[in-house]
Image (cartoon, rainbow, N blue to C red):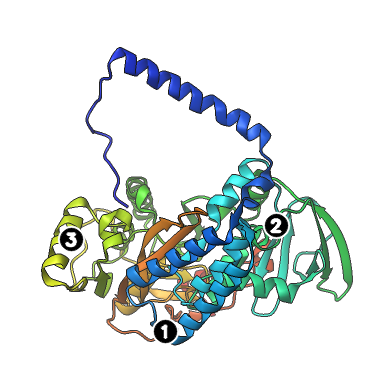
Amino acid sequence: MWRRSGSGIVIKPFPAVAILLVLAAFTFSVNPVYGSDRRKPGDVISRRLDSEEALEDLEHLYEQLQTVHMDLYFSRDKAAAEASYGQLREKVEEKRTRTLRELYTSLAPFVAGFNDAHTSLTFYDEFTEYTDLGGGIIPFYVYLREDSIILTETVAETEVPLGSTVLSVNGLSAEKILEDVLNLISYERKAWGLAMGSRLFPIYVLSLYGPRETFEVTYRTPDGVKEEVLLPAVPLEEYNEKKSQLYPRYEGDWSLEFVAEDVALLTINTFAGSKKKEFRDFLEKSFREIQANMTGNLIIDLRKNGGGSTNVSDLLYSYVSWKPYRNFARVEVKYSDPVLMGGGGGLNPFSRAWEFLRTRFTGDNVVVYENDYKKPPEREYRFDGDLYLLVGRSTFSTAVDFAAVIKDLEAGTIVGQETGGLATCFGDTYRAELPNSGLSLRISYKHFVRTGGFDDGRGVLPDVEVSHDPIAVLNGTDRVLNLAISLAVGGTT
């Protein structure tokens, strides 16, 4: 998104204006405290909208999807989408009022039905506000599989064995919960939907079923014994604290370890554009250390990397390969008015102005950019040994793009499972809020064709495939990483 620089014009207000500003600042800094004391967590998501307001949000949502998306009906027939929209309108109109939570769970499946993982309606802001006010959330972690919910750990100490299969929660069957959660998630590959559902399970449970003080869980132990446990809701801080203890390598942005003789491990959990400088510093320090240790094998773990900016992933590539590269063979961009008027991330003011004039002059708002290969910049500490890249179902967006570069240029060996995100896909999002509910809508306005210039409808496929066992990882056995280490030191698979 366009960000104003910190070196803007300094405004020197008149004394009277300054006094008013101070009073206003005091008012707005004090009043919310009292307001927060009066509000209950549940009030946030139970705010009611009448049918006219809900219908206006639905109409705005569909209009924005059609206007902004690069190719909205690429996988969903337009006639079928129109029929679904008509049915949804009827449901919205027949109910006089509905809560914000109910509106989200009505509209999100419609957006998800277009099968673009970068185009979605989210409940993140509402969840954050709810938890900031002290609202409790579901007190356990799960790993969603195609047909089951695996309980990986509880927040509080219990006697529930790791790897137990959830049978029901508060009387709802696990099958129903799994179906409901996946209906809210936008994805091309179901593996990504399952990964998102696992990672954001508390958000989806809250949006679907509302606040709960306790959770009655029926489960089957790995030994086949059916048990029940009653667990109290927990604050988000407590949930996250336990999560960081369970998955320490994935709670930070990046880390470097030496995991075996002559083997270094870089865990890269984000390519966030806002952290480019910090990432550059981390890479220089890490590769200086790798070179000083004369390490000949490097493993990069992208299994929990949900993406970011190719400007950041380019930095990593420049340290691991000398081969000329391109992130994408081709990029197709739809410059709709909403994108040009400020809602599209990645466009600077000059680009917006130029494309606005060009689209008005030509009447064509779609541009195709063909990309040539380019040399990575010189690096004093560039790695020149054997590279292994770990990927899985939680590897998404820019992380997939990086994996595709390594795969298509044969710059390293890919180990793990097929990436959750597609290698050729839609992306870069226009962001807006629905006018009455304030729900956040994200819509792709670009289409990216992978480095190799083809679209097989798949994620990046591993050269060496190995299944992931979440329970084994919690018990200290990471099969994917262990296999990569074995390959690096010349062992067998």
- Looking at the image, is mark 3 or mark 2 earlier in the sequence? 2
Instruction: Determine the CA span between mark 3 and mark 2.
Output: 44 Å
From the image, tell me which residue sits under label 2: 210
Instruction: Determine the CA span between mark 3 and mark 1.
Output: 28 Å
Q: Which of 13 and 152 is in front in this view?
A: 13
Indicate the quadrant containing the C terminus: top left, top right, bottom left or bottom right. Answer: bottom right
Label 1 secondary element: helix
- Looking at the image, is mark 3 or mark 1 earlier in the sequence? 1
Q: Type of residue at label 3?
A: Phe
How far from the left and from the top, in percent, is residue 317? Answer: 31, 63
For the image, the number of numbered tags is 3
Residues marked 3 and 1 touching at CB (< 8 Å): no
Q: Is residue 85 left or right of residue 350?
A: right
Q: In this view, does 430 lie to the left or right of 324?
A: right
Q: Nearer the viewer, residue 39 or 257?
A: 39
From the image, tell me which residue sits under label 1: 78
Q: Type of residue at label 2?
A: Gly
